[in-house]
Amino acid sequence: MATVFPPRTMTVVQLVPALHSGGAERSTLEIAKALVEAGHRSIVVSAGGRLVEQLEAEGSEHVTLPIGHKSLRTLFTVGKLRRILRGVNPDIVHARSRLPAWVGWYALRGLKQRPHFVTTVHGLNTPGHYSSILLRGERVIVVSQTLRDYVLRHYPNDISTARIAVVPRGIDTEAFPYGYRPDDSWQHAFFEECPQLRGAPLLTLPGRGTRLKGHADAIELIADLQSRAIDARLLLLGADEPGREAYIGELRALIRDRGLENKVVISPPRHDIRDVYAMSDLILQLSNKPESFGRTVVEALAMCRPVMGYAHGGVGELLAELYPAGRVPVGDRERLVERAAELLRFAPPIPPPRAYRLVDMQSATLALYAEVVEGVPTA
């Protein structure tokens, strides 16, 4: 019998602009934690942010360097990053954003012992030379089949299919448990805070305060349901953010114009999103531009909550696979209200999640790292 040797310990440096919030940042922490738990050394280089405390508490190291600021001064971070890399001698440098990838690429060019370069394409970036840096990794991770197709369509001569790995984002099924219901005290506090949402089916649209998320479509949906004598409430969860005052003002004017002041709430980001999902009768994902993935779709379905969204991009891909009843043609207002009425009347059953789990994403990424370092495919 052949002797089986365990994989050697790796040092992995991840490059991101900052650690405030966002899908790429969350994935950075999730992979950093998995590396530490597997006995590897995890280092993240960024401009810092509120997630640094969590990163370090979970065993990773953080080096503060503004490698994502869109300024000529960022060019001066190349030499600093090169010195950092020379000091830690990593096996892998993993860039998750375009400008940090450029800084990392030039920093690596000055090293005699060059680590492996891995990249992740997290979004449907504008095609062009600036974005093409994310295709220079020895392996290029994309977070959905939609994104894989997008990359191959726009860069047919820059990347081979063999270098692309589809590794979807995953959700923590312990954080979003199947069939979870919040306790009575939370429900009481929630409806005391948002009394407008009491007494009728609740629709929730989670998303940042940006026009792309389709908040206006959600408001019009409530008005259309009301015109059909279907009482419903709407929570625009996480839209009320600093710096978005003008946009939120537009949404409030639309709410007033439709006579929905007692049916719609616009909230700031909340830490109890799991409880909000559980109290919702329908989760909405109405982004008017295609997204690379749709984490909220997977989070809600993992908790056995029905989801309705526009059938394009990563959201459409997920709904087609996991919950076809929730797909609606983009911008089709009539079909949107019809489908919402159908799902509020009877939502097809949702099985427990068997894919798109956090452990799946972590395992696939660490396996890819090992494949790159060892130079042989993993089983």
Image (tube, rainbow, N blue to C red):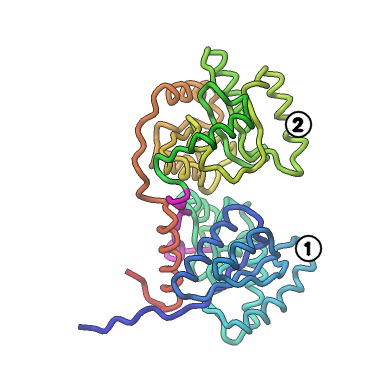
Inspect the image, locate mark 2, and give the three-letter code of the amino acid beneath it: Gly
Q: Foreground residue, 113 or 3?
A: 3
Residue under the image location 40 percent in, 58 percent down: 360
Residue under the image location 53 percent in, 29 percent down: 203
Please identify the quadrant where the C terminus is shown. bottom left
Mark seen at residue 247: none
Q: Look at mark 2 in the image and give the residue it sits on.
A: 249
**Numbered range of the magenta stretch:** 158-175
Which SS does the magenta portion mostly show?
Answer: loop
Is 223 placed left or right of 307 in the picture? right
Counting the numbered discs, the total is 2
Q: Position of residue 79 (x, y in %)?
A: 72, 78
- Secondary structure, mark 2, is helix
Is 299 placed left or right of 113 in the picture? left
- Mark 1 or 2, closer to the camera: 2
Inspect the image, locate mark 1, and give the three-letter code of the amino acid beneath it: Ser
Please identify the quadrant where the N terminus is shown. bottom left
Figure check: 40 above or below 218: below
Residue under the image location 62 percent in, 34 percent down: 236
Q: Look at mark 1 in the image and give the residue it sits on.
A: 71
